[in-house]
Image (cartoon, helix red, strand yellow):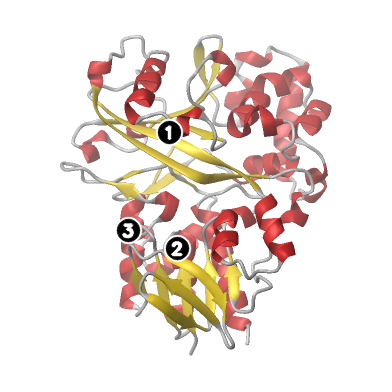
Amino acid sequence: MKQIAIIGAGVGGMAVAYDFAKAGNKVVIFEASGAPGGLAAGFRREGWKWSVERFYHHWFTSDHCMFGLMTELGLASKVVIKRPVTVMYYKGKFYPFDSILAALLYPGLGWGINKIRFGLVGLYLRLTSNWKPMESTTVDAWMRKWAGDKVYDEMWRPMVVGKFGERYASQVNMAWMWARFHARTTQLATYEGGFQQFADDFAAKLKEMGVEIRYNAPVQQIKPAEAGVTLITSSGEEHYDQVLFTSSPALLAKMAPDLPESYLKGLLELKSLGAVVMVFSLKHQLSKEGYYWYNLPKSAGFPFLALVEHTNFVSRENFGGEHIVYAGDYLETDHEYFKLSQEELQARFAEGLKKFNPEFDPSWINQTWLFRTNYAQPVPLVNHSKNIPSIETPLKGVYFASMSQVYPWDRGTNFAVEIGRRAAGLMLEAD
């Protein structure tokens, strides 16, 4: 029987704990916050039946790793599947944009050859599994060559700029875009009670299996030992046969300074963006049309990348009749949004809400919540495969599984489960 420590009680870390506990090992999870869930964690105020995620989340019906795990846990019956409407902005109006057919009707492309090229490119990316050659070129270069300047500039460049900023938009490789076409579905899913309820239910299952989860228990340092690994915590030193770290590359580099210099350098060279999200509780529905997800070009003056009206996906009756709206952005951590106060950001974002409903007035706001994280979106540059850190680090007994390693897939709980269980397999096989 192995003694295993997992740093981080996100969905990926809990998936590893599940596999280890099933194999009869002793597992301790160290979580710096007061609850499980990681970036998918949520909050619930009085009068709400469901929680609201701090950083908006949903599943795609193609998220087989996630749904497979829930089936094993006996929780699949709590999955809720719907088909909300995603829209794209064009000249002051919003148009459905959640399928190839809807996109073909989008007026920004005009008619004729551009729509044919867009349709063929979308179909190819959806059907092909040969993504590896695409990482040797950028989204910008590949799309301009095969879809054309008009299609790229109208359809995809605003999204890539919004997602990665002007600094990285022209550097992101095409395999990342392929993954979005290839894996995403128009039907979306969530969990009865919200993602926090799923995390709580998962944590309860783990405790039944004998897994110990320590909340408000940050690890200060990971050190090699003569046999195994030593963790330094606020309560002292603890020894384990193996340790899995599930947070950011930069934090691993800080926490495990005994890693070889080449591995540390690789961790610190990985690029990522942070996220700033404000959650609004409103008295009235913002979207009269009932739209769920708005893709927004920053060139049009929107103060955020995406607006998500959560209660056009999940019934507002779960939130005491309140309308829940997210306004969020992926940003470099030196952006002013990481420094502005909640009141300052609320005023700026609330002004932007008028673009979605001219009748909106600040008096509609019941309450807001502001969430920021420095690590939310890895940036995959050209030939990114060679930059991915190995799950088994050079420090014996220390393993690393994070969203920076799920490439070419984008971050998300489904791929956290996939890489977590892959890490568990490697750890179980190790001597």
- Which residue in the protein does label 3 denote? 35
Q: Nearer the viewer, mark 3 or mark 1?
A: 3
Residue extending furthest toward the bottom: 1
Q: Which of the two residues, 50 or 277, is positioned nearer the viewer here?
A: 277
Q: Tag 2 or tag 3, which sits nearer the N-term?
A: 2
- Image quadrant where one finds the C terminus: bottom right
**Image side of residue 54 versus residue 12, left or right:** left
Residue 8's mark?
Answer: 2
| Amino acid on which disc 3 is placed | Ala
The residue at 56%/49% (across/down) is 411
- Which residue in the protein does label 1 denote? 84
| Amino acid on which disc 1 is placed | Pro
Q: Give SS at disc 1.
A: loop
Residue extending furthest toward the left: 47
Residue 12, can we see it?
A: yes
Spot occupied by residue 11 in the image (x, y as percentages of width and height): 45, 60
Among the 4 quarters of the image, the one containing residue 327: top left
**Other-residue count near label 3 (Cα within 10 Å), few / some / many at <14 / 14–19 / ≥20:** some
Q: Which of the two residues, 4 or 425, is positioned nearer the viewer here?
A: 4
Spot occupied by residue 187 in the image (x, y as percentages of width and height): 48, 41
Q: CA distance from mark 3 to mark 2?
A: 10 Å
**Image side of residue 430 versus residue 11, left or right:** right
Spot occupied by residue 98 in the image (x, y as percentages of width and height): 54, 31
Q: Tag 1 or tag 3, which sits nearer the N-term?
A: 3
**Image side of residue 223 versus residue 216, left or right:** right
| Tag 3 and tag 2, C-beta contact below 8 Å | no
Q: Give SS at disc 2.
A: loop
Q: CA distance from mark 2 to mark 1?
A: 32 Å
